[in-house]
Image: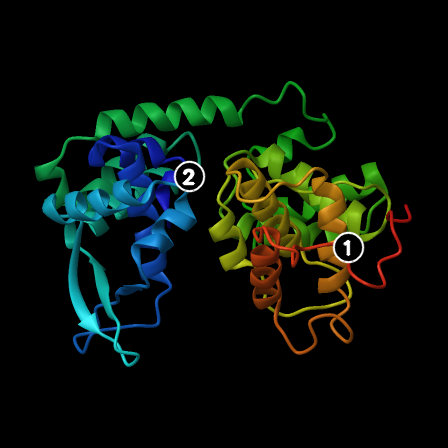
Amino acid sequence: MATIFHKGRKILRSEIGNHNYAEIADLLFFRIQISKYKERNGDAFFLLPNIEYLAEETGIKKRTCERALTELAKNGFISKSKTRCYDGAVRLKIFITSKFKALMDYINSLVSKPSTENKTQNIDINTEDVTKDYMAESDFATKAESYIKEEDQKDNNINNIDSDYKDIVKNVKFSFEDENTYKLAEAVSNKYGLDCQDILFSLIDLNETNLYNCNYKLIDDAIKVIKRNCKIEDVLPSGDVFNSYKAIEVAEDARDTILTAKQQLAIHQMLNYLNNKGKALISNIKEVFSWIEFQITNPEYQFKGLGFKHCLNIIRNLLCDSSKQQYSKPVGFKGSREL
């Protein structure tokens, strides 16, 4: 779990003491979790390409990224060492410490509660079993529980949710093992005239991105995904949490004739990130999205032999290019989507 983008992000910021450092720590934790690199003793590490990588992924200034690594190591959240790679470059190996892992495990135990009724009981049990040692070093339980109550109030704000399925949303887990997920998919399908199986897969796929704090936003985005793929409406999923690198990381790499829910979300978040950070000037995000959609969903003719993420990386570089080789409407694109 990467917490700064979930209910525990305020806890992480509070413990680290700096918003930017916490965002960088969260990125490092996520990268180490999925890293293929391991020491002989089994400890996973992230091989940092360079400091520009952190600046690029987080939008934080390079100098701040450098200070963040120093402070995170100094305060015992990460450890780092230099290594010489096969290409001759010297890079940093970054490890998470037991202190940092205990903090993340503790936050996970707080936000992974089955129900509001037994929330307090679960917090007590998980605190004892998972992070007894860390709690001796840092007292953040009160702040954590307070923040979760705040998030619960937000999630329970159902005044604007359709009465046909608002009761189901309270307990839905968005998984194939959860009966409420099937009930929700059927209710949404009946209301909007969409395929029930498409809705089911879209709900579960978007939930797997961990880019949603609000169930209702997830449902709304799942509906948008299906409407777009069925050419019913020119809409885009946006996510409840903004994190383009994570959206791309969790998206499927395989290409097909339609975009998956995760791929739609990844493209939209990437475009918003580039536009908001001033890395690319995009006057019409929906139009550029349609260009990318056209290329990704024509694997036999566009970017032949390349996976989704490779294609997106090429397009991203072209979007950020200030030369004459900028990204433009692809050959064969017929214009506006036919809805």
Q: Residue at x 31, y 30 (%)?
A: 120
Q: Residue at x 84, y 58 (%)?
A: 333
Give the percent coordinates (x, y) of residue 52: 35, 53
User: What is the C-alpha distance between the residues marked 2 and 1?
Assistant: 36 Å
Q: Which class describes the residues within 10 Å of circle 2: few (<14), some (14-19), or many (20+)?
A: some
Query: Upstream in the sequence, badge 2 or badge 1?
Result: 2
Q: Residue furthest bottom?
A: 86
Task: Check whether the beta carbons of the residues at disc 2 and disc 1 lie within 8 A of each other.
Answer: no
Q: Residue furthest top?
A: 159
Asked if residue 28 lies left or right of residue 192, the reply is: left
In depth, the one of 124 and 320 nearer the eye is 320
Q: Secondary structure at mark 1?
A: loop
Give the percent coordinates (x, y) of residue 70: 16, 47
Colour option used: rainbow
Residue type (three-letter) at the residue carrying disc 2: His
Q: Secondary structure at mark 2?
A: loop
Asked if residue 76 lies left or right of residue 168, the reply is: left
In depth, the one of 59 and 113 nearer the eye is 59
Residue type (three-letter) at the residue carrying disc 1: Lys
In depth, the one of 328 and 93 nearer the eye is 328
Q: Which residue is mark 2?
A: 6
Q: Is residue 90 visible?
A: yes
Q: Residue at x 80, y 45 (%)?
A: 227
**Vertical placement of 106 versus 150: above or below?**
below
Q: Which residue is mark 1?
A: 329
